[in-house]
Image (tube, helix red, strand yellow):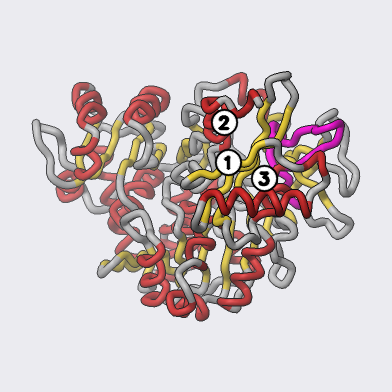
Amino acid sequence: MNAAEHLLGAAALARHAERIALACGDQTLTYAELAAQVRRAAGALEELGVAPGDRVLLLMRDTPELAVAWLGCVWRGAVALALNSQLSEDDFHHVRSDSGARLAIVEDAYAAALPGFVAALARERRIAIAGATGDGIPGWREALARAAPDAACFAAGPEDAAFWLYSSGTTGRPKGIIHRHKDIVPAGQVLREVIALEPGDKVVVTSRLFFAYGLENGLLGPLSVGATAVLDPDWTDTERVCRLVALHRPKAFFSVPSYYRRLLALGEQALAPFRAVRHFFAAGERLPESMAEQWQRRVGGEILSIYGMSETFCVAMVTPPGSSGGRHTGKPLRGVEARLLTLEGREAARGEPGVLWLRHPALALGYANRSEQTREQFRDGWFCTKDVFVRDADGYYAHQGRADELIKVAGQWVKPSEVEEAVLGEAEIAEAACVPVRDADGFERLALFVAASGDPQAAVGAAERACAARLARHKQPKWVRAVQGLPRTATGKVQRFRLREMLEREGGAKG
């Protein structure tokens, strides 16, 4: 069962051969054209010495060229690893070593910006450049031109590795997450079962394809139903995505809450193209109720919260249409099992916080080269997310924060997201993040960081007044600080450890 054949083999082409699979700028590829290019890419990989099971790094923009190379790896039986282009050079070297990759395909613009990384790969004869090459380094596009046009599909088993995802690095070095061919089959379940996406419909996703959210919903999911994946080569700014939506009129739009907030700041005229979109989704961080209400009021469509992670690859939970609004994260999709365990290790009662464990059809095999962490979080077919949820009487799950961030203050549990929600409706505040920090006596206290819409001191004052008015005394933050912007990973997640470090550097935790 080769997952690339599942998406682009004879059965898929019998249904969708002449439909548009990918649209990127002025370029389009039908399903038949995409399948032909994927077979040729598999032949090029073989020519470059890649055997089934070998890892292949892909440092490329989100273009059809990346999609072809990624799917070509899977067709060949190799293991595709799309890389975050905003990693540090040290992290690129870490991934190179950690993955033991046989080959890296690097787009020329990235190659020019990373001479040390390229030089290390070139010494080992493990690189091909997509674009202008030099110093005798093989060219990826030249290898494609020479390759046999119809490489045979590798007869992969369901448990064979197909791709790795490298974590976004919110807490340290990126770690490789190993996924198998079987894990690609559930991709697009939300598109099929929640919104009934049809062949020929278009999908726009602001997240990059190196991220699980973007890879599933922006490429593999649309391909699974005969839809069109709209790709954007560069990091999508708000004006650019407005033009994409106006041009393509997608049926579904996927983004993250912080990006929706940036779109709302553009004004009514800029938001006009979004009124034709049927379905909106948000993931990656908590969707504030105030922002969900504002989007529905101004655009006319509800934002459905979805929850998943790199370890499950595919979405695990979604808020059913008509039940969203930021009040809860959602319900498990068909085939997904969930359970909550308290911090003491017993089953959580309804309404009681518990750490979420998931059993998912696309659950990863584990972490590459991290056997201890794999044993800790992957147990008997279940995965410990380390996220804290509560479940209500109707079966909805609501995200409360990370298990290592839910803290006791004055003997009572406090979730940082509740503090954030208390201030996010203030006009002076654009973003907020609350983190636990130890004070000088070793007690856990809360620190609130706000990004101002205008004057930073006004934002701090507004946050302090809102907390005093809306939160019990033990939930009020000990420190409130203004920042220019919240530190985020390339996938949009807030790097809370950096906020803690910021306060510790200024000595704030001593007061």
- Kindly state the secondary structure of the residue where label 3 is placed: loop
C-alpha span from label 1 to label 2: 9 Å
Q: Earlier in the sequence, mark 3 or mark 2?
A: 3
Q: Is residue 407 magenta?
A: yes
Viewer-closest of 325 and 481: 481
Quarter assignment of residue 428 = bottom right
Identify the residue under disc 3: 360
Taking the spot 18% from the left edge, 44% from the top edge, the residue there is 143
Taking the spot 45% from the left edge, 65% from the top edge, the residue there is 204
Viewer-closest of 206 and 45: 206
Identify the residue under disc 1: 481
Identify the residue under disc 2: 503
- Kindly state the secondary structure of the residue where label 2 is placed: helix
Q: Earlier in the sequence, mark 1 or mark 3?
A: 3
Q: Relative to residue 211, is residue 54 drawn left or right?
A: left
Viewer-closest of 129 and 21: 129
Q: Main secondary structure of the magenta part?
A: strand
Taking the spot 48% from the left edge, 49% from the top edge, the residue there is 3
Look at discs 1 and 3 and give the one toward the viewer.
Answer: 1
Q: Earlier in the sequence, mark 1 or mark 2?
A: 1
Outermost residue, left side = 135
Disc marking residue 511: none
Residue 383 lies, with reference to residue 350, above or below; the image says above
Whole-percent x, y for residue 464 in the image? 68, 48
